[in-house]
Image (cartoon, rainbow, N blue to C red):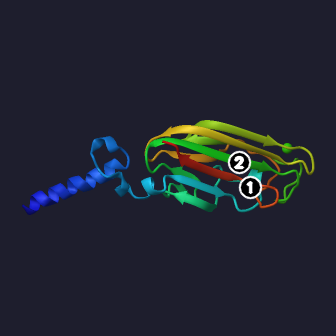
Amino acid sequence: MALTLILIGMVVLQCAADCCTSCSRCSYDRSQCGEYTKHGVAFYAYISKDFAISTASSTFAFDVVITNNGNGYTPQTGIFTTPISGVYGFSWTMMAAGTHIAGTKGDYGEIRTHIMQNGIIKGTLHVDTETYGDDASSTGFVILNLNKDDTVKISKAWIGEGSAYSNEQQGRWTFSGFKIA
Ligand SMILES: [Ca+2]
């Protein structure tokens, strides 16, 4: 009897876990799937300060987290790890500076970025300014089919030059995403 109850309990627990990613496998109450169904999967983060583009690491770590429902985004690495399979939208914004605000010299801000799914390029943005006081900004949006544990990140695609703004006055670098369906 006890063994039967344990086995039933294990099946129910397994069923609950599966139903957060594949509800067709059992008739479990999805309200028990916790935050995935209560608040969806959605994140928004930005970079906290201006920086020299040439010294930026290969993956941008958007260090200030405003929203992180489902805890898919990790600010220390800049990587979103898909908590539940589905269709997702992602947006990112970058801002090149027409000043040397981060201590750079020579040409003003220029940078190209890729949005990567599991290391594969899914989108590209490029900004460039050559004139003092003339800034450049660009925003991209992509829709991706993601499996659980797929990773999405913003990568530096080229060494770049000059400074980047990320502040309250001139604008910020941002990275956001959300589950559509
Ligand atoms: Ca430039």
Label 2 Cα neighbours within 10 Å, binned few <14 / some 14-19 / many ≥20: some
The residue lying at 45 percent from left, 47 percent from top is 149
The quarter of the rendered structure image containing the N terminus is bottom left
Identify the residue position indicated by label 2 in the image. 93
Q: Is residue 111 above or below residue 65?
A: above
Question: Which element type, helix, strand or loop, lies under badge 2?
Answer: strand
Does residue 52 appear left or right of residue 20 in this picture? Answer: right
How far apart marks 1 and 2 lie (CA) works out to: 7 Å
The answer as to whether callout 1 falls within 8 Å of ligand 1 is no
Q: Amino acid at mark 1?
A: Arg
Q: Amino acid at mark 2?
A: Thr
State the image quarter where residue 2 is shown.
bottom left
Identify the residue position indicated by label 1 in the image. 172
Q: Is residue 175 above or below residue 25?
A: below
> Where is residue 115 shown, x and y percent of the image?
62, 42
Mark 1 touches mark 2? (CB < 8 Å): yes
Ligand 1 lies in quarter: top right
Does residue 97 appear left or right of residue 78 in this picture? Answer: right
Question: Which element type, helix, strand or loop, lies under badge 1?
Answer: loop
Q: Earlier in the sequence, mark 1 or mark 2?
A: 2
The residue lying at 44 percent from left, 42 percent from top is 147
Residue 119, which numbered label? Answer: none
> Where is residue 17 shown, x and y percent of the image?
32, 52
The residue lying at 77 percent from left, 50 percent from top is 95
Q: Nearer the viewer, residue 71 or 161?
A: 71
